[in-house]
Image (tube, rainbow, N blue to C red):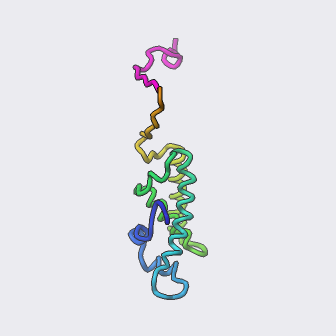
Amino acid sequence: MPLFADLAAMQARFEDRDLLQLTDDDNSGTIDAARIDAALDRSDALITSYLAARYRDTASLHGHALLTDIACDYAFALLWRSDPPEWVAQRRKDAVARLRDIAAGTIKLDQGEEANAARPGQILVSTDPPRFGRDKLAGY
């Protein structure tokens, strides 16, 4: 089962006729959910590989709107057997670019506040920033 998006998210983002055309190989007139799930699983694997560079628990980001969009765009591009249209290829490139930004820390999914687990005997100190230092006295 895909983690970041599902068939309903794909149907909300793309036209049913497009999904039907891309997945209905036996002309049954229904969308092949298994084929879409397979594309979404591949999309999840890519997303998880980028997120693992920055986040410990990637499953906790399930349901994040940005990741759902990325998963849908990438999976939709995977459904094309041959040359996808330019707009599909561009969405795929944009999705991968956003993943690179997430891995680099340019885009933060958790508002930059990842909670650290408490350790026994841990000492926490909060102080004012130093008034003097090499960077502050550079002109002297």
In this view, 109 is above or below 65: above
Farthest front residue in view: 120
What residue is rendered at 44% in x and 67% in y? Answer: 6
What residue is rendered at 53% in x and 56% in y? Answer: 47
Q: Can residue 139 be found in the magenta stretch? A: yes
Closer to the camera in the image, 24 or 38:
38
Left or right for 4, reference 50: left
Residue 21, position as x, y percentages in the image? 49, 81
Residue 4, position as x, y percentages in the image? 46, 60
Report whether residue 112 is seen.
yes
What residue is rendered at 47% in x and 26% in y? Answer: 121
Report whether residue 86 is seen.
no
Residue 28, position as x, y percentages in the image? 49, 88
Closer to the camera in the image, 90 or 76:
76
In this view, 16 is above or below 49: below
Farthest right residue in view: 82
**The magenta segment:** 122-140
What residue is rendered at 48% in x and 32% in y? Answer: 119
Write down the quadrant of residue 67 in the picture: bottom left
In this view, 51 is above or below 1: above
Write down the quadrant of residue 68 in the picture: bottom left
Closer to the camera in the image, 133 or 45:
45
Assign the magenta stretch its main secondary structure.
loop
Q: Can residue 106 be found in the magenta stretch? A: no
Count numbered badges in the picture: 0
Residue 89, position as x, y percentages in the image? 54, 66
Left or right for 25, reference 111: right
